Each structure stands twice: as structure tokens, then as C-alpha cells.
């Protein structure tokens, strides 16, 4: 195996951090060299500090690794960040300033004009903002972000439809899994037999991030896509997998067959470049009337493909469908790893 880049994981003990630990085991390009968490965990072996919840055995390579405090060291080539927003704001900047590329899941920098917000199948060219960011901030490293977990599942199918039919209006109702709230998440007495019709800050992200992702790189900035989005976000009693009911209005109204063709034929740079974590097909279509379902479909394409079903005409807008994505894989850790693979492919790593 060729020499791999040394990767650190910031927030390695959390819901997303654990997925990084799992997905980076035996990665062909990246090797986990450092695990970081809060002061509560620093100094302890990972096997002791992390309350492992991923439904596969904990990788043995991580067991004895001693968790570090959030100090940048020069023995990592990049870090993946699964930090809460507040700590991400300072820690990610510290690492980028110390010359280390930060591939982040956190929302702290997603909206910043000089920070790329990227889904490799959707807007791989937006990584050019890295040069603007380094110039603006004087950093040797940089920060690249992936979107909110609901936004990735939504925007993947929107991309080919926007390119062909011109999106104007989006209405989306999310049904988001418990793991999306991090560990330990909502307590059983709150979430059992229940749906929570409010997730703090979530609707703002779902209404803002697709406009940047589907926007156009013009000079040193992104011109956002001119799309109106209305989101209603709910927490449901599902372990993993965000389901979203989506209605779309277009400039040129397509029929459901044309939508199915556009989604089925869609491939992006990760598929063409055969990036290691890219699913063969980013969007899978189901014609079963009661699919996709979180329990049955979240692991499609090893959790990296999204599944779209129930594609049909909408009586208010033009087209409606249901989309499912794995929130901690394609919606978080897998998304960041695919971003890092894109950056290596483009020469930024
Ligand atoms: N869960 C999802 O589906 C999802 C999807 C997309 C994006 N995200 C984003 O990814 C990030 C992580 O989410 P999560 O669900 O994995 O959260 P989580 O389960 O609460 O994990 C948070 C991690 O950050 C560490 N941490 C907490 N406070 C810290 C501090 N003050 N200083 C340093 N480290 C600290 C924790 O370490 P200790 O164990 O030591 O406390 C833990 O490793 C968030 O920004 C979230 O919005 C989550």
C-alpha cells in the first residue's frame, strides 16, 4: 500500500466521530494517526472513553490510542472535524492557522463566503474558494465543509433536476433519525412513542445551504441559486436514516418519467474519478410503493447512496418524491471522507 496521509479526527468519541473511526479503517489514502475529544476524554484510551454505538464492532486499531486534547501538532496531514458548532469555531481555525487542512462536518463555517461547502457530485469546483480563504485569512491550512445531514440527501437528487429543468421552489418535510442529535441524543422518555416537531437551527440550514451548493462560482465568490425553499424538520424515533418528503416547482415542468431518467442517469466526478468512497450510483430509484424506508434502505451503497421513491406529480407544485439518506454516513462522516478524497484528487492534499 502506498504511503497514506496521516489523519486526525476531532470529536472522535461522538456519533459522527465514531463513524469516522469506522469508515477510515483500512482506507487506501488516509490512516488514522490521532484522535481528539474534549477535556473529559483527553488522556484516556479510546476504547475506554468512547461509548461505542455504531452497529459494527469497534475497530481494534483505535482501542489503545490515547485521546488528545485539541492542540494542533505537526504529525497529522489533515483532520476531520466532528465537533459541536461552538468548539468547531475556534478549534478548526486554530488547526487551519497551524497549516492543517480541516475537513469539517460542523456548521460553524458553512455559510462563510470564503469557505467551500461541498458535495463532490454537486459542486466540486467550489473547492477553488480555498485559495481565496488562504489569501483572506493568511492560513497555511484551510477549512472545507460538508452540508447538514438533511441537506445532503435533499441536494443530491436536486442537482440533476436543477441542471435540466431549472428549480424554482422547494418544499421539504424531514423525518430525522435520533443519531442526528448526537450522543446520547433525546432520552427514551422523550422520543419513544413520539415525534418532535422542532430541531433547533435545522430549518434555517435546510433553507440556506442548498442555495450555496447549487450556486455558481463566479470569480472569488459563489452566486447563490435563485431558489425559494420552505423546510419543516421533525425528529422521529428511528436509529439512523433521514427520510424527507419533497415537493418541487420548476421553470420547465417535467413529467415523472423524465425525472426518473435524469436521476437514474446521474453520475458525478467521484464516480468518474473512481474515488474510494464513491458509490457506483449516487442516486438509486425504487418503484416499490412503500419504499424507501430507513430500516431497509439506509445502507444502500454502503450508506453513501441516497434512495428516491414515490416519484409522482404534485397538485400544488410540479413533482413530489420521498428521499432517504444515511445521516451519519452520507450525511456526515462519509461525506467528509469523500470531500477529502476529492481534495486529494484535485491536488489540495
Ligand atoms: N449526528 C449527525 O447525524 C450529524 C450529521 C451531520 C453533521 N453533524 C455535525 O457534526 C458535529 C458532531 O455531531 P455529533 O452528532 O457527532 O455530536 P456528539 O455525538 O455530541 O459528539 C461531539 C464530539 O465533540 C467532542 N466535544 C464536545 N464538546 C467539546 C469541546 N468543548 N471541546 C472539544 N471537544 C468537544 C465530544 O467529546 P467528548 O466525548 O469528550 O465529550 C465528542 O467527541 C456537530 O457539529 C453536528 O452538527 C452531525
Image (cartoon, rainbow, N blue to C red):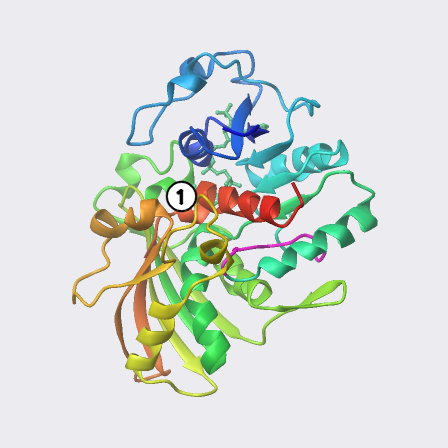
Residue displayed at 57% across by 61% down: 123
x and y percent of residue 318 in the render? 36, 83
Tell me the element at label 1: helix
Quadrant (top left, top right, bottom left, bottom right) of the C terminus: top right
Q: How many marks?
A: 1
Q: Residue furthest left?
A: 289
x and y percent of residue 316 in the render? 34, 83
Q: Residues within 10 Å of mark 1 (few under 14, many from 20)?
A: many
Q: Quadrant of residue 57?
A: top left
Residue displayed at 25% across by 52% down: 297
Asked if the stretch drawn in magenta spans residue 166, the answer is no
Left/right of residue 303 with respect to residue 33 in the rendered view: left
x and y percent of residue 118 in the render? 57, 55
- The dominant secondary structure in magenta is loop
x and y percent of residue 66 in the render? 52, 13
On screen, residue 228 above or below 107: below
Asked if the stretch drawn in magenta spans residue 117, the answer is yes
**Which of 48 and 270 lies nearest the eye of the viewer?**
270
Left/right of residue 329 with respect to residue 188 in the rendered view: right
Instruction: Give the magenta range.
Output: 113-121
**Which of 22 and 310 lies nearest the eye of the viewer?**
22
Does any atom of ligand 1 lie closer than 8 Å to the CB of label 1? no
Query: Which residue is disc 1 drawn over?
Result: 329
Residue displayed at 32% across by 49% down: 301
Amino acid at each position: 500500500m502506498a504511503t497514506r496521509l496521516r489523519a486526525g479526527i476531532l470529536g472522535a468519541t461522538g456519533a459522527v466521530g465514531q463513524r469516522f473511526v469506522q469508515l477510515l479503517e483500512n482506507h487506501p489514502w488516509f490512516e488514522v494517526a490521532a484522535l481528539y475529544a474534549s477535556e473529559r476524554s483527553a488522556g484516556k484510551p479510546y476504547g475506554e472513553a468512547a461509548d461505542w454505538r455504531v452497529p459494527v464492532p469497534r475497530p481494534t486499531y483505535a482501542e489503545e490510542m490515547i485521546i488528545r486534547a485539541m492542540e494542533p501538532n505537526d504529525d497529522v496531514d489533515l483532520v476531520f472535524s466532528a465537533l459541536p458548532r461552538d468548539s468547531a469555531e475556534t478549534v478548526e481555525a486554530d488547526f487551519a492557522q497551524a497549516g492543517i487542512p480541516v475537513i469539517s462536518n460542523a456548521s460553524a463555517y458553512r455559510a462563510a463566503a470564503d469557505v467551500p461547502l461541498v458535495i463532490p457530485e454537486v459542486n466540486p469546483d467550489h473547492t477553488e474558494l480555498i485559495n481565496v480563504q488562504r489569501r483572506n485569512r493568511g492560513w497555511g491550512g484551510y477549512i472545507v465543509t460538508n452540508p447538514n445531514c438533511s441537506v445532503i440527501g435533499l441536494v443530491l437528487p436536486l442537482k440533476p433536476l436543477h441542471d435540466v429543468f431549472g428549480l424554482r421552489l422547494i418544499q421539504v418535510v424531514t423525518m430525522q433519525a435520533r443519531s442526528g442529535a448526537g450522543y446520547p441524543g433525546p432520552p427514551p422518555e422523550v422520543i419513544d412513542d413520539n415525534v418532535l416537531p422542532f430541531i433547533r437551527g435545522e430549518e434555517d440550514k435546510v433553507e440556506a445551504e442548498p442555495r450555496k451548493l447549487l450556486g455558481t462560482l463566479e470569480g472569488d465568490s459563489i452566486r447563490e441559486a435563485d431558489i425559494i425553499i420552505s423546510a419543516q424538520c421533525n425528529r422521529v424515533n428511528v436509529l439512523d436514516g433521514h427520510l424527507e418528503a419533497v415537493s418541487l416547482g420548476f421553470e420547465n415542468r417535467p413529467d415523472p418519467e423524465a425525472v426518473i431518467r435524469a436521476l437514474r442517469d446521474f453520475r458525478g466526478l467521484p464516480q468518474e474519478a473512481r474515488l474510494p468512497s464513491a458509490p457506483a450510483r449516487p442516486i438509486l430509484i425504487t418503484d416499490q410503493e412503500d419504499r424507501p424506508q430507513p430500516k431497509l434502505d439506509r445502507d444502500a451503497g454502503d450508506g453513501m447512496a441516497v434512495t428516491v421513491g414515490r416519484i409522482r406529480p404534485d397538485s400544488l407544485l410540479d413533482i413530489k418524491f420521498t428521499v432517504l439518506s444515511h445521516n451519519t454516513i452520507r450525511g456526515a462522516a462519509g461525506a467528509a471522507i469523500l470531500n477529502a478524497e476529492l481534495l486529494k484528487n484535485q491536488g489540495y492534499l
